[in-house]
Image (cartoon, rainbow, N blue to C red):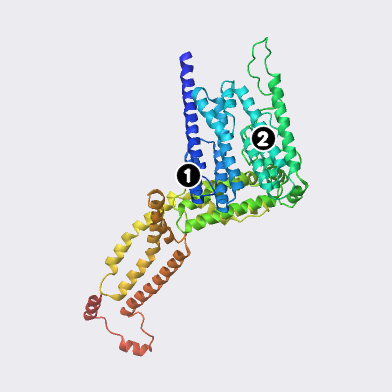
């Protein structure tokens, strides 16, 4: 029996060590990229942010929630590099480092031996902990180490909030408050926590909007100090006396059960208290069920939205990112398009999805699935992003009690079913198969007769859009997965892609009608089917008799 227990334990331990090793290597590479983000060299900063985003997408070291939040902050950091905003850029990089620090913190408390030492070094660098304190936590039991580090983070949060109160300018206050929020992300799941992420988000919004912020920061400081006092009191109560053996770590009190870590910027904490009066008034005008209104209000307040209009403003921001993605797809720049899609999806998940699930859960999940499919799809087209924009509008229509109708829902289901490989294979196969009827047309209508040649040329222009569509998808596949990005321009041959291709399709249809009409008219005239009407008597007199000589002449013509 002992042998049967040792093997599973060894497997679990080896898996934990492998994950810890992957996390330390991931942090080293990410920090090397973030260290090159400087406003003095914008091009280098953008390239470094691109590498950091690629690491977050490719590596599986971070939980999806932390990864999505870090990707969102990195995308915002790119915008602040372009705007040359040093304070906003530093705040976003702080949040990214501490989101990674949260993963390091959790892994440090569970690791053993050399891996724990390696994780502790990265944790100290990522979150600004004193190395001596980390070394002390290494030798302590996990629960004692957690309280020791948590107390240090709370002390640093109190210092940051004090600096925000004493700041001489709003940028200084914003940066100090952002540091406090970043440290909070590390210990947000503490059983003794008295705060929620939305408390910091609301305070940051007050600072950036020019409103009075010091009363809110003072309230945060009081909550942090009370939290730290509770933690120190708990440590004192559980400290063993000199004459008795140290008892095992005491679990959290039953009145304060440990909560799962809330997602930064999401509905992660329990809703307490009533809704603001202005928000309640807005919700009263919505055509929703009372239960849906209650869930919607709780979700809005948990995310820090003071109004439904604030949530709609974020939806407009996501639409703007999708519009940029649509522009990049139209010009064949698929890498930039996917970067905008990733940013839009991250913002949607963090800022829009929790609220949309409160009143339209089915449409919200369908929109999230469509986002995922578009991010993974081969051969993106502008019409695909148009359908996704329609889904965002559908969420807004549902909020107002309306809908875009069944036709939109049918388009979304068709996108989910055929997007990507199925659609690309369909059009490429159709283009390849079209060569066989074109060959048959050549041997059937080829020859010296000009009318038969015009008819054959009309059939060629009939098949030309199919050939162009297949060639466009072949170019998209080779551009994205064949290492030939220049072939991405072939996507412009698709009717679903560009205005020129649309007019080209219209011209080919016009040529089909013109050439087929001219050819068929000539053939009909040769067969005597288009003679002008004459009197019946003269027609009988002039009607030639079909003889063997006439048949021979027709055969020679054709």
Label 2 Cα crowd, 10 Å radius (few <14 / some 14-19 / many 20+): many
Label 1 Cα crowd, 10 Å radius (few <14 / some 14-19 / many 20+): some
Q: Position of residue 19 (x, y in %)?
A: 49, 30
Q: Position of residue 232 (x, y in %)?
A: 70, 24
Q: CA distance from mark 1 to mark 2?
A: 30 Å
At 29% from the left and 63% from the top, the residue drawn is 440
- In the image, is 168 to the left or to the right of 501? right
- Label 1, on which residue? 51
Which disc, if any, is residue 79? none
Where on the picture, by quarter, is residue 530?
bottom left
Is the residue 532 above or below the residue 273 in the image?
A: below
Between 384 and 16, the one lying in front of the other is: 16
Is the residue 323 above or below the residue 23 in the image?
A: below
- Label 2, on which residue? 157
- On the question of residue 132 being in view, the answer is yes
Q: In terms of secondary structure, where does tag 2 sit?
A: helix
Find the residue positioned furthest to the right: 277
Q: Position of residue 193 (x, y in %)?
A: 68, 31
- On the question of residue 416 being in view, the answer is no
Find the residue positioned furthest to the top: 243
Is the residue 446 above or below the residue 284 in the image?
A: below
At 68% from the left and 53% from the top, the residue drawn is 401
> Which of label 1 and label 2 is nearer to you?
2
Q: Position of residue 130 (x, y in %)?
A: 59, 29
Q: In terms of secondary structure, where does tag 1 sit?
A: helix
């Amino acid at each position: 029996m002992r042998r049967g227990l040792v093997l599973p334990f060894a497997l679990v331990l080896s898996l934990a060590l492998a994950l810890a090793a992957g996390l330390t290597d991931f942090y080293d590479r990410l920090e090397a990229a973030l260290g090159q983000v400087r406003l003095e060299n914008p091009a280098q900063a953008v390239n470094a942010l691109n590498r950091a985003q690629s690491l977050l997408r490719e590596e599986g070291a971070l939980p999806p929630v932390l990864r999505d939040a870090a990707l969102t902050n990195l995308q915002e950091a790119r915008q602040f590099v372009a705007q040359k905003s040093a304070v906003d850029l530093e705040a976003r990089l702080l949040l990214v480092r501490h989101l990674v620090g949260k993963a390091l913190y959790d892994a440090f408390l569970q690791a053993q031996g050399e891996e724990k030492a390696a994780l502790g070094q990265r944790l100290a660098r990522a979150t600004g902990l004193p190395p001596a304190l980390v070394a002390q936590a290494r030798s302590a039991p996990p629960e004692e180490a957690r309280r020791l580090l948590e107390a240090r983070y709370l002390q640093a949060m109190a210092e940051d909030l004090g600096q925000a109160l004493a700041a001489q300018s709003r940028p200084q206050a914003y940066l100090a408050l952002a540091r406090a929020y970043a440290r909070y992300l590390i210990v947000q799941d503490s059983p003794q926590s008295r705060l929620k992420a939305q408390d910091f988000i609301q305070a940051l919004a007050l600072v950036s909007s020019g409103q009075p912020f010091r009363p809110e920061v003072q309230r945060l400081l009081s909550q942090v100090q009370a939290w730290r006092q509770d933690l120190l009191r708990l440590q004192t109560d559980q400290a063993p006396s000199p004459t008795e053996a140290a008892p095992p770590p005491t679990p959290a009190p039953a009145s304060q059960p440990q909560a799962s870590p809330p997602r930064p910027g999401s509905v992660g904490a329990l809703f307490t208290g009533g809704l603001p009066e202005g928000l309640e008034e807005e919700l009263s005008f919505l055509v929703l069920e009372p239960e849906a209104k209650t869930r919607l209000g709780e979700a809005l307040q948990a995310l820090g939205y003071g109004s439904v209009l604030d949530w709609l403003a974020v939806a407009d921001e996501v639409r703007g990112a999708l519009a940029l993605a649509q522009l990049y797809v139209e010009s064949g720049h698929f890498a930039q398009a996917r970067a905008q899609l990733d940013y839009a999806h991250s913002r949607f998940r963090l800022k829009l999805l929790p609220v949309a699930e409160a009143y339209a859960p089915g449409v919200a999940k369908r929109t999230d699935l469509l986002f995922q499919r578009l991010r993974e799809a081969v051969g993106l087209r502008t019409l695909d992003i148009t359908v996704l924009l329609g889904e965002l509008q559908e969420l807004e229509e549902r909020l107002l009690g309306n809908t875009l109708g069944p036709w939109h829902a049918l388009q979304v289901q068709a996108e989910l079913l055929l997007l990507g490989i199925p659609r690309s294979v369909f059009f490429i196969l159709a283009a390849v198969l079209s060569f066989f009827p074109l060959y048959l047309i050549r041997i059937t209508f080829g020859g010296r007769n000009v009318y038969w040649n015009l008819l054959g040329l009309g059939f060629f222009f009939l098949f030309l859009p199919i050939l162009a569509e297949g060639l466009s998808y072949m170019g998209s596949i080779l551009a994205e997965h064949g290492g030939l990005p220049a072939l991405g321009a072939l996507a412009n041959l698709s009717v679903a892609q560009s205005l020129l291709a649309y007019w080209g399709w219209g011209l080919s249809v016009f040529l089909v009608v013109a050439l087929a009409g001219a050819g068929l008219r000539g053939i009909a005239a040769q067969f005597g089917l288009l003679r002008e009407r004459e009197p019946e008597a003269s027609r009988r007199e002039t009607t030639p008799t079909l003889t063997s000589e006439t048949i021979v002449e027709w055969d020679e013509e054709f």
